[in-house]
Image (spheres, rainbow, N blue to C red):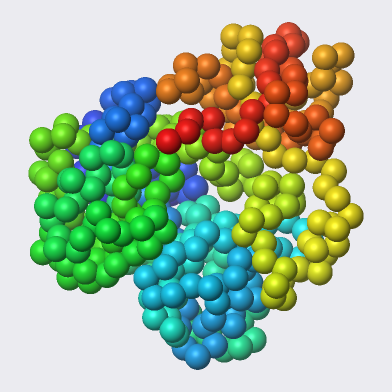
Amino acid sequence: MKTVPLHQVHVALGAKIVPFAGFEMPVRYSSDLDEHHAVRNNVGVFDVSHMGEFLVKGPKALDLIQKVSANDASALFDGKVQYSYLPNDTGGVVDDLLVYRIREDEYLLVVNASNIEKDWNWIQSKNSEGAQMENISDATCLFAVQGPNATATLQKLTTVDLTSMEYYTFQIGEMAGIPDVFISATGYTGSGGFEIYVPNQHAERMWNTIFEAGEEFGIKPIGLGARDTLRLEKGFCLYGNDVDDNTSPLEAGLGWVTKFTKNFNNSDSLKAQKEAGLNKKLVGFEMIDRGIPRGHYELCDAEGNKLGEVTSGTQSPTLQKGIGMGYVPVAHSKADSEIFIKVRDRLLKAKIVKLPFVKN
């Protein structure tokens, strides 16, 4: 198991450490519920330095990104971020990722921790253009400062005007006296805030300074437990649960980042699937009966016939009811359709709802 550079800081803070994506990671410091509400209502900090970062440079950088990713990276401009995914050769998804345009011939790709080596090898295998690639994952720390008071906390540390930054943009500037920090108006919580990329040697200074700046707001460290409930309330997919090598990105609702105006890896077969019509869809559902849907619980019709299974599920701290996502046949995917979750041989009633579960 690998550890993030601030591992001992988290241990000293009393974090419960668990294995996740090949890393020893803090899952919680106090309680999942307390940390969830801290981010929704105030401000919290996640150490997500396990994530992967690749630089792609040179005159062929865009060509490579266009070939391996489904979204249209030619629409990016300097300082713009794009959500995308890497289609595989068999109709599934290698990974989902963020694409940052630093300048015309330089991009940053941010990938999931569990897929760093897999993604690197995959992109390299498609790099017939000879784009320059550099894996900076092990040299980079990433802190997600999320919540309504994230901007007020971080603005104390930089002259970059954070209030004017639009969602899915970034700037490179000084923060906490550290030069060339990537300040990204992105996150995985749906509560606003920023993701801060900083070289390992400055990580502890950045972490400590953020907590000093947020002291007046009661800023808290947040673990992976609350990260999961926060992202699920917003209907954000988690790779390995809701999308993977064997799930169709179109059935997963990623049609909005699948641009058939260009050719990309396996685009012809995905286009044919779209034209033929989808067989199933990833949907969100809320429990009507009392119960918590867990991963791999069966989704059934009223007669108990299996329709699919739960890909992500939890008790929503905000809604105080069970919520989840899973794939069902298109005929069962309309909002307000009744479905049942099989929990220990009991069928518990739920209904399909439009995502996100928690609106802004």
Give the side of residue 178 with respect to residue 283, left or right: left
Residue 173: x and y in percent read 21, 69
Give the side of residue 288 with respect to residue 13, left or right: right
- Seen from the viewer's position, the closer of residues 293 and 164 is 164
Give the side of residue 256 with respect to residue 162, left or right: right
Q: Residue furthest right?
A: 276
Q: Quadrant of residue 274?
A: bottom right
Q: Is residue 283 above or below residue 197?
A: above
Q: Residue at x 15, y 60 (%)?
A: 158
Q: Residue furthest front?
A: 164
Q: Residue at x 30, y 39 (%)?
A: 147
Q: Is residue 193 above or below residue 92?
A: above
Q: Residue at x 40, y 49 (%)?
A: 187
Q: Residue at x 60, y 28 (%)?
A: 324
Which quadrant: the C terminus? top left
Residue 79: x and y in percent read 37, 70
Q: Quadrant of residue 325?
A: top right
Q: How many marks?
A: 0
Q: Quick check: can you spot residue 7? A: no
Q: Quadrant of residue 257?
A: bottom right
Q: Is residue 106 above or below residue 68?
A: below
Residue 56: x and y in percent read 47, 78
Residue 269: x and y in percent read 83, 64
- Seen from the viewer's position, the closer of residues 296 and 354 is 354
Q: Is residue 74 above or below residue 260?
A: below
Q: Quick check: can you spot residue 58? A: yes
